Every structure is written in structure tokens, then in C-alpha cells.
Amino acid sequence: MSYSSASATPTHDLRHERWGAPGSHDAKRLLLLGSGELGREVALEAMRLGIEVIAVDAYEKAPAMQFAQRCYVTNMLDGKALEDLVEQVQPDLIVPEVEAIATNTLIELEKAGWRVIPTALATNLTMDREGIRRLAAVDLNLKTSPYRFASTVEEYREAVEAIGLPCVVKPVMSSSGKGQSTVRTPEQIDIAWNYAWEAGRGQEARVIVEGFVDFETEITLLTVRSISGTHFCPPIGHIQQDGDYRESWQPCALRSETLQACQEMAAKVTEALGGWGLFGVELFIAGSADGEQTVYFSEVSPRPHDTGMVTMVSQNQSEFALHVRAILGLPIGEIELTRPGASAVILAPEATDMPHFSGMAEALSVPTSQLRLFSKPRAYKNRRMGVALALGDTTDEARDRAKSCASKIQIT
């Protein structure tokens, strides 16, 4: 399904531009802010279209740095360092691929004429759970779980009492589930506060307390805003643990009316954020005794989503290819599900500076399986070091194969 919107067109339109080879004076330069596994795939897709990629991260030899034309190590939360880097590189596109960025600096850079993907406002709002929740619930009137924000332990305890147990506690600024926990008993209340507070980012740390949604399904609806309007990928089901994804599958079966409600909600929130690119819109699907389903907005990322790694095998165009096409002002074309697919993460069991992998032959003996090992130079407990992908005649078969493939990889 496509949803056309006149407001989809950004100020910069690259359709009629041409670019030279990487390294030339008229090369099209993409500054990738975040060079992990998702950034690596964005870089590969950009390079396939002749774009010069400059990879940036907080540590050396991050996955995308290992083949980008240029790379820099810097603290992206340091606004002055980020501004200096942009002035040095002179990029055509600034593409944030992580949340740990000085977003206020991105806003100033955009005001000065630099192009931030999808927009600096979108990056700023979505890094801040308070900002995106108020946009969704107050400005757009989308259905969300009940919520309250707290800056002190006293406000936090009042929020928990008002929301009730069970509830979910998160820092307003964090990534990959850091600081997130579900509070089910009174004994867990203070533990959750300390965990969220320590993991939060920013000088004014705050937490959000959310009412627990008893959902049937949690999905990611990959939504692409482009020159040709808004497009949707088939919905992706996923399982999270401690706020971080463990497996995903596509398609996730939904009723036609539920899917339409999901697409309408995703279109509203991404249109409000603006710009071109791929957005990962997370939604809860809750059921009722009479069989009706209700869609709740959860979160949105203005970039490829970790659960969307399944699209590297399940779609004719991966989420990364779609993101690059959209930000370059290129037509999206058809988005087709080629076959039911699934992904399962490969986690490090412990910390080590020199991770070694084994079991690849056994893993790839699983029918239709594929591996993506991320080549991260350092592991720590439960760090995502790779992902197993697989296809099947059904999503259940694909999930079984992906989990079997992942289980055979050993990290020492």
C-alpha cells in the first residue's frame, strides 16, 4: 500500500543531480553518524549507487568503518566536535544511524543549510521519548498506553502509583533497551528507577512510566517517505527481551482492518516528523473478548530498524536499500515479499577484546540459512555480534530455522 502526501517533498531534491566517483571533487558525500551493523548495511547500499561514505563512530573499527572510503572516531554527543567534522567533510547528506548524537547541533546545522536525514527535528524528537510521546498522544491524538514522566524519585513513585502495576519504566533518552524494565511487584520499583536513571542520557535525565499493554502482537511497520509518497513494507513481528529485540519475522499476520489502522497511524506520525527516508514504527496490537483488535503507538525510529534486518532475505529490497533510495530522491518502485523470513540474534556470552567465532559450517547447514557476522572488535555480555536469517514456507518454519542457525554459532 502507498500513501501519497504532498508534504513528503523536502527542500533538497536530488533527482536531477549527478555525482562523480567517490574521492572526486563532485562526489556525493554521505556522512554516516553511527557505524554499527545497521550503519554498515546503509553504507553498502549507498556505495552500490556510487555514493562516497564517510563513517563515524565513537570507537575504531566499527563495522561500517571497515570498508568506508573515509572514517573518523569522535564523540558524537560533543556538539562542537560534530560541527567541526561537518565543516571538514562538507557532506551532501548527514545520516544519523544511532541515537547518541548531539541533536541540538543537528538542528543548528540544518538551519545553516546542511541536509540532515530525515530532518533534524525528527532525529531530536525520536531520541527523546518524552518528545515523541507528546507528539503522538497530544498533537496527533494517537492511542498510546497511559504514561507519566518523572525527574525525581518522589515524582517517579507518584507516577507508578498513578499508573499502577505492572508498568514499564524507561529513561526518556536511551537506545537498544538500555535502562528499560517491567515492574510487576513493589519490590522492583526502586530497582527499576536506579536502572533507568543510570542508563539515561542527557543532562536533564528523566524517566517515563508507561502502563503495561497486554498485547497479542508487537510489530514494526517499516514506513518509507519518498519522492513518490509513503510506502509500507509488510508488517514485521518481533520478540523483545529487556527492551532489545531477539528475533523477528515477516510477514506478521494481521487482519486487514488492523493493518489499515497500523498504516494510517504510521503515516500520521511519519508525516508529522517529515523528510525522506525509512522509519521503523513500533506498534502494539491488543485483543479483546469480542475479538476486536486495538492498535497502540509505541515508538518510532527515523532510520532502519534492528527488527528489519529480516528484510535482507524476505523482501526484494531490504530496508537499507529503501532508506538509501528515499534519501537520494530516487523512486522506490515495488516492495515485494519474496518469501516468509525470520531473523534471530547472535549474542556474546561474555566480554572480550578479541572475539572468535566458530560453528559457521553447522549453522549454514540449516536449510535457507544466511549469516551476518558484524565484525565488532570487542564483545561484552549480551552484545549483538551477528544475526541469523532464514526463509521458510511459513513464518514458523523460517523462525525455527533462524533460531537453529543462530544457536550453532559460538563466540569465545
Image (tube, rainbow, N blue to C red):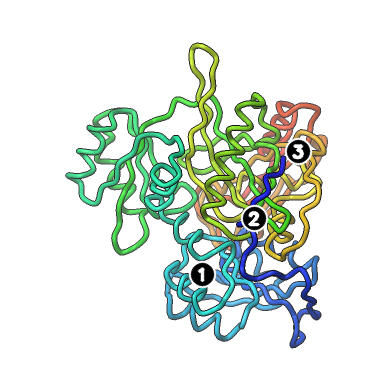
- Give the label, 1 or 2, closer to the camera: 2
Q: Quadrant of the N terminus?
A: top right
What's the distance in space between the residues labelled 3 and 1, CA to CA?
A: 32 Å
Q: Nearer the viewer, mark 3 or mark 2?
A: 2
User: In x, y percent, where is residue 166?
Assistant: 34, 28
Q: Is residue 236 at least partly visible in the picture?
A: yes
At x 65%, y 71%, the residue is: 12
User: Which residue is at 80% across, 35% downward?
Assistant: 339
In the drawing, does residue 358 fall left or right of residue 258?
right
Residue lying at the far top in this picture: please name it. 290
In the structure shown, which secondary structural element does the residue marked by tag 1 occupy? loop
Q: Residue at x 57, y 86 (%)?
A: 88
Q: Which corner quadrant of the image does residue 368 belong to?
A: top right
Earlier sequence position, callout 3 versus callout 2: 2
Task: Identify the amino acid type marked 1.
Answer: Ala
60, above or below 173, in the image: below
Q: Which residue in the structure is indicated by mark 1? A: 58
